[in-house]
Image (cartoon, coloured by chain):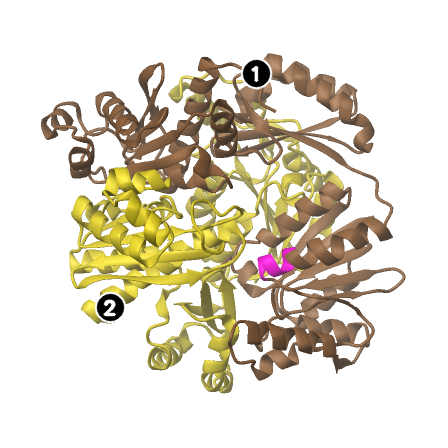
Chain colours: A brown, B yellow
């Protein structure tokens, strides 16, 4: 079974919106064993929508977008015409839309009433999260599912209405993936280090992909024979553990913040941060994870130099003497933070993110990261680059990875 | 002139990576007046790459991905075969790759040397940011540009090598867009309020698109007649200012953090935050903007309830009495933060992001946002929803918008 995802909307083509819907659907479908043939992003234009349907080589098209209440939303009309189904008022949908607005104590608009007119004969996929109903059009050779483009509505309908029916209606050849998340070595160096191991995968008919992202390289091992290869792949991952023990951060969707959170939780330890150049980015990454209030206490964001004195009592003369971006200041920040936030661990960052140099004499891209923990305090210097947003991201990832390595040192164990 | 963007990589199809390259290219190209026909995301598979080239209706294909040093990167070979150009060692590229590694004090690998073998006869687009060279293949009816998938390398080559040549080689019918960023009213309500205005746009042959994102609706006005409609569109935007004066946050790529930053800078005022449930997300949004150290001082992230007492001296009994998520606590947080951070304005957040309820008795999704400023302190209650990440994002956007409205109150003026 092959699926084409069609993402409809000028805002996607002209780059005003990033196509996160397609990646979410891709993830969900491929984990079911559905093969994504392609993702096609097109304009809100009836001719383009028709061309996408007519040219497809897939069995199922999942289209998102163009179902809103405004005049630039054309998908429903195009599909109704293509499948020759008149638009008729669908009473249960109208009731739902009425309830939706009365619950929010807002008036219902004419445009919303029109959203209850649906193609007669399509399978209706209720939208509990909004007013644009999903639709499933059936024909022997081709099915088309149309969903709203608002991500949480699309996700809700997909999860509740579509996912169980795909499992029921299609017999799927499970594609089996396992992904190992690594941090600390670039793609080429990792590939060189893993050359023999990679060859051994090929001999087992397993395929390997390197997925680099700033600071991280994911290794994805795939089998088209499905879950029967699971133990084979597990064995190869065990080998990887002896080849690059410190570089493996986690698996699948693991993030460094999530892994650090699990370790802290497991060790019943607490974390705080004193951030200058990352300005709360480490804290907010930690808090994205549900339950983080068990181990993450809080932070002092001493972005301006004067706050390093006001909040941490680091004397002006000390900062003057060593430079605000220095090992000495990073160490003091981590130590003072650990005391004031009363945590087991405290990360500190001080650096120059660019484009201007700020209060430091060092080069743009320089970041000192400090860690204070039960066994003492240390700091390390990094040189990232010229791009501000990338520097912030890299400093955040690297700081959390230093904490991970430091915690592993104090209590080494396998994290699953 | 029509362009198809082809994004190559299984990681995009299975949703492991979000296709930000396509949106970036879409933005760049459409601002040049190039029409993006479609974005096609396909597998790292030679047959799929060939099919994309053979089926295109565009004049130019810009392909990204599949140029890395590892074995799963196949684009270069496929294109060399399709255009019948043998791969030969390109000396300047080899020198560049050697310099790239020696500068980083890292050994060069065999796989990197192979990256210097390029199709003979294609136009070579040097990559100053990495080791995968860009290539431009020319044929009368169709050109294909191949770029690496690593975003900053792709962006670097596009900006330095491709953009100036596209301007030179193609005569472009400028597509003219103007986008107004609004915050504070949902899509349907905005559309109802703007119905007459929207109709007046249609009469002028201008098209309008509503681009909703969490907390924000962008209004994009487009003309296919190019910049000659600029003053016409400007006039319609002026009308919009009288229709929805407080809802307009900015224009084009403006973010609420950027707009707030500009206002603070203009007023020579400073900002700090005391964040609980947003845990540094407001601070890190402010600091994404270059130059933010002029007005953003820092934050106290009192994520755990105990830190609200330890760092802000809000008595435990006070928090107990009113609930940690309450107007009283939000007000105290903002006031205490303003004092301790010595800022003109201080934002505070305290809320329950879910999935668990934490220390509060209120409902999941409840957030109190406080603002302390020169003219006093106030707080407002919001009910967002069940999704943790969305609640954090919404609270951040709404807090910054409250600050914007509050600053407008103290000194009302047009922001450009």
- Where is A33 relative to A51, above or below? above
Residue A180, quarter of picture = top right
Q: CA distance from mark 1 to mark 2?
A: 55 Å
Image location (x, y in percent) of residue A66: 63, 68
The dominant secondary structure in magenta is helix
Q: Residue at x 70, y 44 (%)?
A: B49
Image location (x, y in percent) of residue A141: 88, 60
A307 with respect to B15 (left or right): left
Q: Nearer the viewer, mark 1 or mark 2?
A: 2
Secondary structure found at label 1: loop
Residue farthest to the right, as pictured: A140
Label 1: chain letter: A
Say which quadrant the C terminus of chain A sits in: top right
Label number found at residue A244: 1
Report if residue A29 is visible in the image. yes
The magenta stretch spans residue A177: no
Choose between A201 and B400: the one closer to the eye. Answer: B400
Image location (x, y in percent) of residue B385: 51, 58
Label 2: chain letter: B
The magenta stretch spans residue A154: yes
Choose between B332 and B132: the one closer to the eye. Answer: B332
- Where is B370 relative to B119, above or below? below
- Where is A375 relative to A227, above or below? above
- Where is A255 relative to B352, above or below? above
| Residue extent of the magenta highlight | A150-155
Label number found at residue B408: 2
Q: Residue at x 34, y 78 (%)?
A: B241
B226 with respect to B35 (left or right): left
Q: In the rendered structure, are the residues bearing label 1 and label 2 in contact, judged by CB atoms less than 8 Å apart?
A: no
């Amino acid at each position: 079974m092959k699926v084409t995802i069609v993402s409809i909307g000028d805002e996607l083509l002209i780059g005003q919106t990033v196509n996160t819907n397609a990646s979410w659907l891709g993830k969900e479908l491929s984990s079911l064993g559905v093969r994504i043939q392609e993702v096609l992003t097109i304009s809100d234009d009836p001719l383009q929508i028709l061309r996408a349907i007519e040219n497809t080589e897939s069995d199922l098209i999942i289209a998102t977008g163009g179902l809103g209440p405004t005049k630039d939303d054309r998908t429903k009309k195009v599909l109704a015409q293509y499948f020759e189904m008149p638009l008729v008022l669908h009473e249960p949908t109208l009731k739902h839309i009425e309830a939706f607005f009365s619950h929010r104590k807002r008036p219902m608009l004419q445009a919303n009433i029109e959203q209850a007119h649906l193609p007669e004969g399509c399978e209706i996929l209720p939208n509990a999260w909004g007013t644009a109903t999903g639709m499933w059009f059936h024909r022997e050779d081709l099915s088309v599912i149309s969903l709203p483009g608002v991500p949480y509505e699309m996700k809700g309908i997909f999860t509740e209405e579509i996912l169980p029916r795909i499992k029921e209606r299609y017999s799927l050849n499970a594609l089996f993936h396992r992904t190992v998340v690594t941090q600390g070595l670039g793609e080429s160096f990792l590939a060189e280090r893993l050359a023999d191991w990679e060859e051994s995968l090929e001999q087992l008919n397993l395929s390997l992909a390197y997925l680099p992202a700033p600071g991280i390289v994911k290794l994805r091992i795939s089998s088209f024979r499905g879950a029967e290869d699971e133990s084979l792949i597990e064995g190869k991952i065990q080998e990887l553990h002896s080849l690059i023990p410190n570089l493996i951060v986690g698996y699948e969707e693991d993030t460094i913040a999530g892994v650090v959170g699990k370790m802290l939780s497991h060790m019943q330890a607490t974390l705080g941060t004193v951030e200058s150049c990352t300005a709360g980015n480490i804290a907010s990454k930690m808090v994205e994870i549900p339950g983080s209030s068990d181990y993450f206490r809080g932070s002092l964001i001493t972005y301006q130099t004067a706050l390093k004195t006001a909040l941490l009592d680091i004397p002006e003369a000390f900062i003057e003497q060593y430079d605000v971006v220095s090992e000495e200041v990073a160490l003091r920040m981590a130590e003072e933070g650990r005391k004031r936030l009363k945590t087991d661990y405290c990360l500190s960052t001080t650096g120059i993110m660019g484009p201007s140099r700020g209060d430091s004499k060092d080069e743009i891209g320089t970041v000192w990261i400090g860690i204070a923990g039960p066994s003492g305090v240390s700091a390390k210097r990094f040189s990232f680059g010229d791009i501000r947003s990338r520097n912030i991201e890299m400093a955040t990832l690297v700081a959390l990875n230093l904490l991970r390595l430091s915690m592993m040192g104090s209590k080494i164990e396998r994290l699953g």
